[in-house]
Image: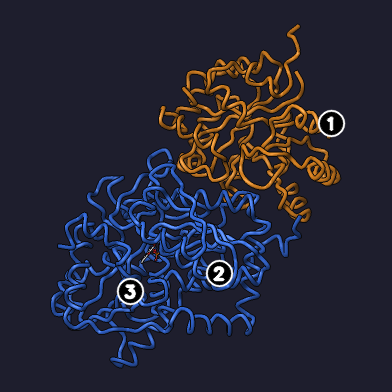
């Protein structure tokens, strides 16, 4: 039986005026969550941990990632300048590795032997599998059945990296079901396993941990754009699944006079079940341990979602991003499946960069930004599109 | 019959079954029963209760319909309503209390609501006579056990409003595999040292010997997944409970 370091949390667990977030976890997970918060605070304050994290981010992940001007894309969209923060060039092909590496280092420091993770698009699963291989921990990834089919290359990558991939057939077979199953698995093995949650969601302290490890995106990007242009951009834009790449990019710009926009999955329609736009389609509710904006029916049952992008179809927004939206600090837009596919094709042809379908939703709003008169845009290119080739081919985007 | 706290999933396979089961439970001499209100994302439940909740939701068991059905079940043991926060929270405390009033529900077991996370909501329900049941697990430190017992003041008369739920193992409901009864015994003794409230022990109990062992510790065993599976297969409650020790002949 574990002895809790404390019976209360120390870090703020709530966000914004509506008090989103919190820790709505089954009692079995409360002490592991209290221990995790204590370990996280101790690690952040420990120069040895910080040193190792910085070294691994440089040598293993390949940070800093470039900030790339995209002049042909800007011209095509009618903007003066677009800068892409190239998280697609981070090791394993997406921003997910920043958080996965940080948490696996933390788990090893806590003496955990085993890692559990969920994955939607498979990017977080691949990143966690890679970090576990690098640091010598066992890794089990839970993934919805439908996602395993549409992101098959990532399933193969996880297995090559030595992870066990467990199919979750329940429900729609997407990220929500994978999180359910990972939480259950953690409750059964919390004495020896750490659960590496992949986005800024879940019970406290996860939203804060994930966002902290992702903030390096925005810290680098802010420095890089000031070095390159001598000024801040007019707009910072990113896609929002749970919200980890968006928060990571935007938080360092929160105090600046910069417009912050998060783009959600508009799917193929505006009715409940046809999209994953939580800001104007959702209501406050509790899912997977936190209070936030949730797509749900009138009975409080989580609704089905739809998106061409496996990383954006989660039915809830991370609580901190939802709070920033409700408090008017971040604007929520949506882009449809069709717009995202077209935007991916445009970037590929204009700049020779094939983006993941997730961040293609951010690319899709560039023409709207041009119409609204935003000359200089910084965009979070959260991942590369190789995993989405089958979808591009099916949707006729690769002809 | 021997002391036992059975768990039923409302609406599985159909809500119309519920009044009959509750009446049967009363006929069997049970003073308290747990009724599950199905949720779409039951993160603390194993495959059996997940499937039962899904069947119930598909068959139309919304929170409102379940509570309205319970309002038509006067012939029932006291009910501990087992569920997750969101379906209750969406109703709003006022409407929830209005729906609970005519039912035999005496307390709430909200699996994903640690004490103090929704203080105003919890207090409104407690004041209306619906206390939250404290759930203690193998990971709950004794310092935290003391704190939880302290925060969850006793509700009133009867087992349903006073008992403390001890989770027997790590993980989710319905896990089988051998139970480490020695550590359950140690846990029961430790909690006994802190409170004289009645205890129930559950999660993964079904073998008659394990149920008897829990009874010998002075606690009431909870049988969930096993009963739900048998009821879904069309058995009567009495037959579903035979694994919990054959009911004594009715006098
Ligand atoms: C490339 C990529 N971008 C974005 C996301 C969305 O997640 P988040 O909003 O947490 O950044 C994912 C999630 O799988 C992803 O793989």
- Figure check: B187 above or below A276: above
Q: In this view, does B179 lie to the left or right of A141?
A: right
Which residue is painted at 59% across and 43% down in the image? B111
Q: Sequence order check: which comes first, mark 2 or mark 3?
A: 2
Instruction: Say if labels 2 and 3 share a chain.
Output: yes
Instruction: Identify the residue at the far top of this view.
Output: B251
Mark 2 secondary-structure assignment: helix
In what quadrant of the picture does the N terminus of chain B appear?
A: top right
- Which residue carries the number 1 mark? B216
Which chain is mark 3 on? A
On the image, numbered disc 2 is attached to which residue? A103
Q: In which quarter of the image is residue B248?
A: top right
Image hue for chain A: blue
Alpha carbons under labels 2 and 3: distance apart? 22 Å
Identified at 78% across, 53% down, the residue is B142
Nearer mark to the viewer, of 2 and 3: 2
């Amino acid at each position: 039986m574990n002895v809790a370091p404390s019976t209360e949390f120390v870090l703020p667990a709530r966000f914004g005026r509506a008090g989103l977030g919190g820790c709505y976890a089954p009692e079995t997970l409360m002490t592991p969550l209290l221990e995790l918060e204590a370990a996280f605070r101790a690690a952040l304050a420990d120069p040895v941990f910080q040193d190792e994290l910085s070294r691994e981010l440089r040598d293993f992940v390949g940070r800093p990632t470039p900030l790339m001007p995209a002049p042909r894309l800007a011209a095509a969209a009618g903007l003066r300048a677009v800068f892409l923060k190239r998280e697609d060039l981070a090791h394993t092909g997406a921003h997910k590795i920043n958080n996965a590496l940080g948490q696996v280092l933390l788990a090893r420091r806590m003496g955990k032997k085993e890692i559990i993770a969920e994955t939607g698009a498979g990017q977080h699963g691949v990143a966690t599998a890679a970090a576990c291989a690098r640091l010598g921990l066992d890794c089990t990834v839970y993934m919805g059945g439908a996602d395993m089919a549409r992101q098959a290359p990532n399933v193969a990558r996880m297995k090559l990296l030595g992870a066990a991939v467990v199919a979750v057939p329940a429900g729609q077979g997407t990220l929500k079901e994978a999180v359910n199953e990972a939480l259950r698995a953690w409750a059964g093995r919390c004495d020896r396993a750490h659960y590496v949650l992949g986005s800024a969601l879940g019970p406290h302290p996860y939203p804060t941990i994930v966002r902290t490890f992702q903030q390096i995106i925005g810290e680098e990007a802010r420095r890089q754009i000031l070095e390159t242009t001598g000024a801040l951009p007019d707009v910072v834009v990113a896609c929002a699944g749970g919200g980890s790449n968006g928060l990571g990019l935007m938080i360092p710009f929160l105090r600046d006079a910069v417009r912050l926009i998060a783009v959600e999955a508009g799917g193929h329609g505006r009715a409940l079940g046809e999209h994953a736009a939580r800001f104007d389609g959702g209501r406050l509710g509790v899912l997977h341990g936190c209070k936030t904006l949730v797509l749900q029916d009138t009975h409080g049952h989580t609704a089905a979602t739809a998106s061409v992008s496996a990383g954006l179809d989660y039915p809830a927004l991370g609580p901190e991003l939802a709070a920033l939206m409700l408090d008017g600090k971040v604007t929520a837009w949506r882009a449809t499946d069709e717009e995202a596919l077209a935007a991916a094709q445009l970037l590929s042809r204009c700049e020779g960069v094939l983006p993941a379908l997730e961040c293609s939703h951010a690319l899709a709003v560039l023409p709207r930004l041009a119409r609204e008169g935003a000359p200089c845009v910084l965009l979070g290119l959260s991942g590369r599109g190789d995993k989405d080739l089958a979808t591009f081919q099916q949707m006729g985007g690769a002809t | 019959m021997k002391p036992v706290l059975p768990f039923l999933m409302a609406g599985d396979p159909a809500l119309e079954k519920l009044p009959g089961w509750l009446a049967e439970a009363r006929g069997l001499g049970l003073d308290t029963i747990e009724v599950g209100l199905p949720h779409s994302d039951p993160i603390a439940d194993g495959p059996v209760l997940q499937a039962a909740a899904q069947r119930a939701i598909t068959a139309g068991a919304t929170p409102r319909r379940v509570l309205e059905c319970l309002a038509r079940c006067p012939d029932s043991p006291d009910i501990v309503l087992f569920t997750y926060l969101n379906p209750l929270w969406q109703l709003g405390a006022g409407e929830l209390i209005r729906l609970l009033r005519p039912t035999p529900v005496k307390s709430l077991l909200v699996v994903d609501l640690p004490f103090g996370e929704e203080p105003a909501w919890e207090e409104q329900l407690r004041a209306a006579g619906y206390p939250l049941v404290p759930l203690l697990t193998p990971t709950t430190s004794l310092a935290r056990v003391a704190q939880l017992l302290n925060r969850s003041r006793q509700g009133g008369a009867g087992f349903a409003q006073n008992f403390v739920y001890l989770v027997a193992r790590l993980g989710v409901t319905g896990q089988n595999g051998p139970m480490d009864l020695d550590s359950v015994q140690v846990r029961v003794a430790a909690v006994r040292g802190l409170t004289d409230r009645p205890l129930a022990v559950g999660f993964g109990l079904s073998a008659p010997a394990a149920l008897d062992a829990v009874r010998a510790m002075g606690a009431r065993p909870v049988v969930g997944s096993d009963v739900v599976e048998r009821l879904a297969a069309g058995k009567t409650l009495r037959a579903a409970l035979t694994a919990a020790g054959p009911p004594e002949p009715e006098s």
